[in-house]
Amino acid sequence: MTNLQRIRIQRGIPLYVLARRARVSLGTLTAWEKHGCPPVRIEPVQRVAAVLGVEPEELLEPAKEAQP
């Protein structure tokens, strides 16, 4: 699970709502969550971070694996 997905779920924001609020395509967010491919440009990352109330770096750092 990516940091984006974890934070988004914690905030209770559906993916399509995040896409609309951040002005980022649903396809871009889906690729980021499902395949770990964040946008190449920093601006979309900054907009998503602002909507989620986190720093862009938090979304881009490697996800911490759950402990068994």
Image: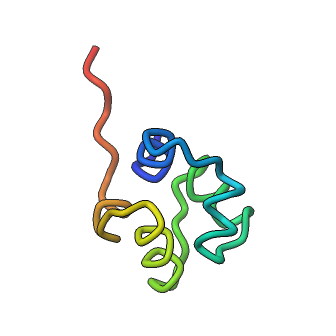
In the image, taking residue 26 as reference, residue 64 lies left or right, namely left
Q: Is residue 9 above or below residue 44?
A: above
Instruction: Name the quarter where the C terminus is drawn.
Output: top left
Look at 42% across and 72% down and name the residue there: 50
Residue 59 location (% of width, % of height): 37, 60
Image-quadrant location for residue 65: top left
Q: Is residue 42 above or below residue 54?
A: below
Residue 55 location (% of width, % of height): 29, 68
Look at 41% across and 47% down and name the residue there: 7
Q: Nearer the viewer, residue 23 or 26?
A: 23
In the image, taking residue 32 as reference, residue 60 lies left or right, namely left
Residue that sits furthest to the top in the current view: 68
Total numbered labels placed on residues in the image:
0
Residue 11 location (% of width, % of height): 46, 45
Look at 36% across and 63% down and name the residue there: 53
In the image, taking residue 6 as reference, residue 68 lies left or right, namely left
Colour convention of the picture = rainbow
Look at 52% across and 54% down and name the residue there: 36
In the image, taking residue 60 as reference, residue 38 lies left or right, namely right
Q: Is residue 24 above or below residue 15?
A: below
